[in-house]
Amino acid sequence: MMRQYELVERVQKYDPTADEALLNRAYVYAMRAHGNQKRASGAPYFSHPLEVAAILTELRLDDATIATALLHDVIEDTDATRAEIDQLFGPEIGALVDGLTKIKKLDLVTKKAEQAENFRKLLIAISSDIRVLLVKLADRLHNMRTLEHMKPASRKRVSEETLEIYAPLAGRMGMQALRDELEEHAFRWLNPEAYQTVTDKLDELRAKNEGLVDDIALALEQKLAAVGIKAEVNGREKKPYSIWSKMANRQIGLEQLSDIYAFRVIVDTIDDCYRVLGVAHTTWRTVPGRFKDYISTPKQNNYQSIHTTVVGPRHQRVELQIRTRAMHDVAEYGVAAHAFYKDARHVETQNAQKMNGASQSLVFSDKESGPYQWLRRLVETLLEGANPEEFLEHTKLELFQDQVFCFSPKGRLIALPRGATPLDFAYAVHTDIGNRAVGAYVNGRHVPIDTRLRNGDEVEIQTSKTHTPPAAWESLAVTGRARSAIRRAARDAIRRQYAELGRRLLISAFDRIGETYTDESLRKALPRLSQKSVDDVLAAVARNELKVEDVVRAVAPEVAAAARAAPPARVEEQPSKTMKGWLRLTRAASNKLRIGGASSSLPQSADPQPETTTGRVRGVPIRGVKDDMPVLFEEGGAVPGDRIVGVLAPGEGIRVFQIHSPRLQEFEHERWIDVAWDVDPDNPQRFPALIVVTTPNRPGALAEIADVIGQAAGNINNIKMIRRASDFMDMRIGLDVWDLAHLNQIVNGLKSKAVVTKVERVFE
């Protein structure tokens, strides 16, 4: 077990200004607090926080983080309290220890809903200070190193949690070395047979290619030295889990993998990186499609390097990773290589030391940069989301997927998961851009919104201020950010639709008692209705969760009481000169009915916006399925010119029925509402109608019927054979038409054809 002075020396080696007294106090306090506690292995419990601190010294972290590592279990496992930690070590370390204590209580491999909620808590805890995550990752690494002492069930649970959550988080934070080791241990315990198989295969290849790594490294060094490039070349094998993942993803055997060996070429300057690339490409044959320049376009976690694959000595494919020393530090330690410190003076001091060439811990003071920025965006997404399970699903997608780099027309670089679309790009730029997106141009060419993007694509998004993303777009998006935003926009659109419907229902109800509805009058009545906002009331009314009469009584109790006490007024309707037929329908498109199932129709003027007159009920305008209200048409449909009735269906909005629909009798009259056609001549819409056509069973009959409908500019949306005999057949045809006159034109056209025996309109 490492001694007290050894730990202090480790920290002071890279940070001479470290607070030695703080480290000594934390060491002694933690050792005394854990006392005689033992780990499952039988070792003193204090050996665990000490090893966690040792791991963090390898990452060259500040003294506060090292002290936190020593203390991270004392609140959870001893009698120590947060107040005591604050008093002895300050509120900064107290907050870090408290954050780690909360994380330790989370079970991230449990039922999906609980797992999602716990993951939200995890991210919120680590987002306040990235050092919480760094200590937790080091804690998990030491636990994985000693996992053999735990029970099999615990090993499985911890390994799953590591592979699903902590290893990907380490990768996203750029800490590749730590991620590799976490994955290695988890793979070993979760799939021991596969682990052993890959390990044995690697042993065979190592024996077969004995000296290959040294030969390639030596050849590289000689080639670079010949042109005056000072470089450090390190060769290594890929890790078993990395190899297994590639074999599984590509469905290939280990022998078919071409990049089992990778070499890191570390040089002094960026210029040298590109000189090394030139030497490699002129010395050995390159493998097409295996070149990536992450120096000019860094990864989202600030990773920078040049990747290329060449056919090197012994005709062996090898991957070269070319980078500077600073890039190598970031590649190995990620966010730990530039940990964010809250103390600005400490940052300034450390940076000044760096300028003077002093050995020091690497510092990074920009909280909105690189991997930390990704973490912050992730937390913003989870705080906006309504469903933690969806967030967990999307977060895992973003954790595991590789990246593609695209540019905006102004040159802004956007990093997206591989397989992302222009829709994901739009939401990555800004949520409002995504919500208003209607089209996209990729490299100047107009493409579908679900086109897969490739590295280097320039993406331009077309927008419309009046556009709302349809819910179906969620299936087109790849990123969790886009999916969450689309779902949120769809929820908001539905809420607005219900609010508008509720508002129109209340306007109609207030008109009946001779009052004018206003949102302000409703706002004053919110306490009596036990609702939080006006929109909540309006949506509840539209969903039939709150009765219109109850709202009217709450807003205008005296007027409502007087209206109930007064005898109903008798309305005498005079026949209009414009009325036609026994139904007395007007030629105009607007019709409306009395509430409560009254059977008489009220004639309307040609004005699509019906007015309220004395004794007349104002109808809710129905413009179509694309209206700003939730409107559904019952099977069989209805078209402008039909007499219609609305039924308030809980959770659905208004369901519109034609007056002759046999299904109307299934609903109580109290749920009927007055509706009126509101046809906009500048933006005509088609409406659904259903007809049954009887025709002789002979070739060409269907073609003639379709031709008649097409010639009349009708649209067929569905055809179904409902009865078929040797000499005739009945077809039920779903149509989209402009209005009743258009439907009659189609019906009359069909009747005029010899191939049609009978045509009738149906409503079910």
Image (cartoon, grey):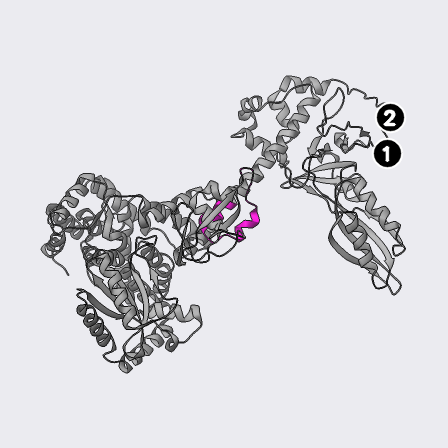
Q: Which residue in the structure is indicated by mark 2?
A: 577
Instruction: Sort mark 2 into few (<14), some (14-19) or many (20+) by Cα contacts within 10 Å.
Output: few
Instruction: Looking at this view, name the residue that lies furthest to the bottom.
Output: 208
* Spot occupied by residue 300 in the image (x, y as percentages of width and height): 34, 52
Q: Amino acid at mark 2?
A: Lys
- What amino acid is found at the position of numbered circle 1 in the picture? Leu
Q: Is residue 755 left or right of residue 26?
A: right
Could you tell me if residue 146 is visible in this image? no
Front-most of residues 737 and 596? 737
In the rendered image, the quadrant that contains the N terminus is bottom left
Q: Which residue is mark 1?
A: 583
Magenta part of the chain: 465-486
Q: Is residue 11 left or right of residue 142?
A: left
Q: Which of the 4 image quarters holds residue 612? A: top right
Task: Mark 1 or mark 2: name the one nearer the start of the chain.
Answer: 2
Q: Position of residue 253 (x, y in %)?
A: 40, 76
Q: Secondary structure at mark 2?
A: loop
State the separation of the CA atoms marked 1 and 2: 14 Å
The residue that appears at 22% across and 51% down in the rendered structure is 69
Whether residue 741 is in magenta: the answer is no
As displayed, is residue 551 above or below residue 185?
A: above
Q: Secondary structure at mark 1?
A: loop
